[in-house]
Image (tube, helix red, strand yellow):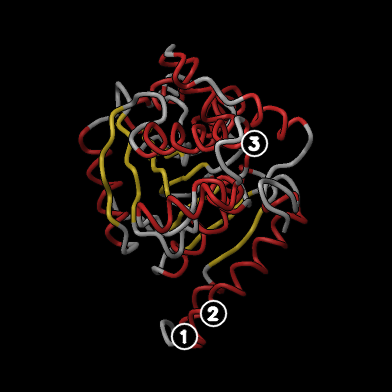
Amino acid sequence: MMIKTIGVIGAGTMGNGIAQVFAQSGFTVTLVDVAQPMLDRARATIEKNLGKFVEKGKLTASDREAALARLQTATSIDQLSDADYVVEAIVENADTKRGLFTSLDAITKPEVILASNTSSISITLLGAATKRPDKVLGMHFMNPVPLMTLVEMIRGQATSEATMRVASELCTALGKTPVEAADYPGFIANRILMPMINEAIFAVMEGVGTPEAIDAVMKLGMNHPMGPLTLADFIGLDVCLAILNVLHDGIGDPKYRPCPLLRRMVAAGHLGRKSGQGFYAY
């Protein structure tokens, strides 16, 4: 099928990044969020990001204007009835996502593929909320989306080979590299990343080292571009906690138990960059 029109749901950090890369790559994009202020902020962020690309010579001014012209916003998913492909990037909550997928199934054309940018929730569970589980998959972009080339592709129990192929070709069209993962809690990326972040938080709680020391060891000793605690702040401590809960509940192994310090920080509203305070002050 010819995919020209993309629906992206959720105008947060991930959603606006996904909308940007599709618009940049020549697709017509409708970015949907229930809150108009979120949409206004997302569009301003996309304009700013595209402007940086122009400054660095990675994009011409006319390409920037063309990309912005291909981007429209809406406050209702009803606007996606004509979309050729949909990517969901809302809050990391299974029940909320399932409700959305049921609604999308009723609104969109029957041949449309429904993708989720979930970082840990079961694709099989989301597919089961629709009458087209063969056309539901995970498309987990990495943050920041415009710069990171990996897209983790998750095949649910019923996801068809054709769906995986179409989605992979779409990734390639975006200049991204698709890597397939099975539908296990956390998939590949967060199955490996989150226990490391969690262990770093335990090390802070137990006084093994300061956040600065722990990050310095991982950067200078392990050649990581960013320390695990800086990365946790960047991702959002609430998001880290949600993913660890999915890992702990889904796999049942106590090694995935979220650190009590992480729970306490989230309860206090210290979520990292987005709240101005996490392991570091912003």
Q: Position of residue 208 (x, y in %)?
A: 55, 36
The residue singled out by tag 2 in the image is 52
Considering the numbered disc 3 on the image, is that residue within a helix, a strand or a loop? helix
Give the amino acid at mark 3. Asp
Considering the numbered disc 1 on the image, is that residue within a helix, a strand or a loop? loop
- Residue positioned most to the front: 208
Residue at x-position 30% and y-position 31%: 155
The residue singled out by tag 1 in the image is 56
**Marks 2 and 3: CB-CB under 8 Å?**
no
Name the foreground residue: 264 vs 140. Answer: 264
Q: Position of residue 16 (x, y in %)?
A: 57, 57
The residue singled out by tag 3 in the image is 238
**Marks 1 and 2: CB-CB under 8 Å?**
yes
- When asked about the image quadrant of residue 204, the answer is top right
| Local crowd size for mark 2, using a 10 Å CA cut-off: few (<14), some (14–19), many (≥20) | few
Q: Position of residue 250 (x, y in %)?
A: 44, 16
Q: Position of residue 76 (x, y in %)?
A: 67, 45
